[in-house]
Image (cartoon, rainbow, N blue to C red):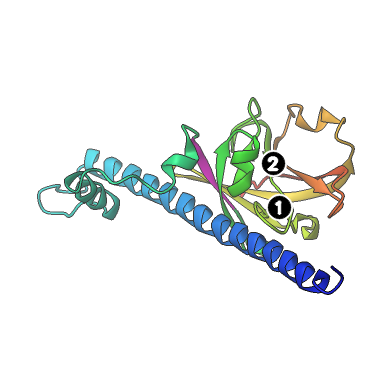
């Protein structure tokens, strides 16, 4: 039995590494697809607005790439979008960009495990981006999947967090970061300021507390 123990341990290690790599590749794939899907949505919005304003002659101009793709899909029997099964009716509500950390991720409405596996989640009932109040986002911090808030502890006052929703872009400037216990839900409360609150688990590995990074809307 002892003879085969090292080989068994090696095999178990390889399986664990394989699962981790699969999760990482899967997360990257679906996140890229979600961002791509939102970019298509923005293209449609811009196209429709320009058409309504008479800036585009629909007889002369070609349709946006996503519409051409959609028409082609209909002709081929309406191939299923690879992210439709994942979304399950959830709404892509925007894009978050954190330039300092090279983060670009889709934001979904809701904060259940499935939403946070591939995206950042908007906490239901809190403000929308750009609105007065507390716009709350949750994200994972692990090394396997949903790692978009892994390095937010590196953000300092003045660092930018950019939220894109529809045709609008909102820039928040980080003001503070601190740690609370999971029971301290006051961080979800509405605020007088137009504020962004990002929440993730801390410390790494044990994840017993919550790291809070906050920012306020830029006046520029």
- Identify the residue at image location x=11%, y=53%: 60
Look at the numbered disc 1 and give the secondary structure of its residue: loop
**Cα–Cα gap, marks 2 and 1:** 8 Å
Which residue matches tag 1?
149
Predominant SS along the magenta part:
strand
Q: Is residue 81 left or right of residue 74?
A: right
Furthest-front residue in view? 1
Which residue matches tag 2?
138
Residue 50 colored magenta?
Answer: no
Q: Is residue 57 left or right of residue 79?
A: left
Q: Is residue 81 left or right of residue 105?
A: left
Q: Position of residue 45 (x, y in %)?
A: 34, 42
Q: Position of residue 159 (x, y in %)?
A: 72, 58
Q: What is the quadrant of residue 217 in the picture?
A: top right
Are the two marked residues, 2 and 1, in contact with CB atoms closer than 8 angstroms? yes
Residue 93 colored magenta?
Answer: yes
In this picture, which residue range is highlighted in magenta? 91-96
Q: Position of residue 104 (x, y in %)?
A: 57, 57
- Identify the residue at image location x=61%, y=60%: 24
């Amino acid at each position: 039995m002892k003879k085969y123990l090292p080989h068994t341990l090696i095999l178990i290690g390889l399986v664990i590494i394989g699962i981790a790599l699969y999760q990482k590749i899967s997360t990257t794939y679906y996140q890229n697809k979600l961002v791509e899907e939102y970019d298509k949505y923005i293209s449609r919005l811009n196209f429709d607005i320009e058409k309504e304003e008479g800036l585009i002659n629909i007889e002369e101009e070609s349709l946006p790439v996503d519409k051409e793709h959609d028409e082609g899909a209909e002709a081929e029997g309406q191939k299923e979008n690879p992210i439709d099964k994942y979304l399950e009716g959830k709404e892509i509500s925007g894009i978050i960009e954190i330039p300092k950390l090279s983060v670009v991720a889709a934001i979904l409405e809701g904060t259940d495990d499935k939403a946070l596996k591939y995206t950042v989640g908007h906490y239901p009932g809190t403000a929308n981006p750009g609105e007065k109040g507390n716009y709350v986002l949750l994200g994972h911090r692990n090394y396997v999947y949903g790692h978009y808030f892994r390095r937010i502890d590196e953000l300092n006052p003045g660092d930018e967090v950019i939220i894109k929703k529809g045709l609008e872009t909102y820039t928040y400037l980080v003001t503070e970061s601190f740690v609370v216990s999971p029971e301290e839900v006051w961080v979800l409360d509405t605020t007088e300021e137009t504020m962004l609150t990002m929440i993730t688990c801390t410390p790494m590995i044990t994840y017993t507390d919550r790291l809070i990074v906050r920012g306020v809307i830029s006046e520029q």
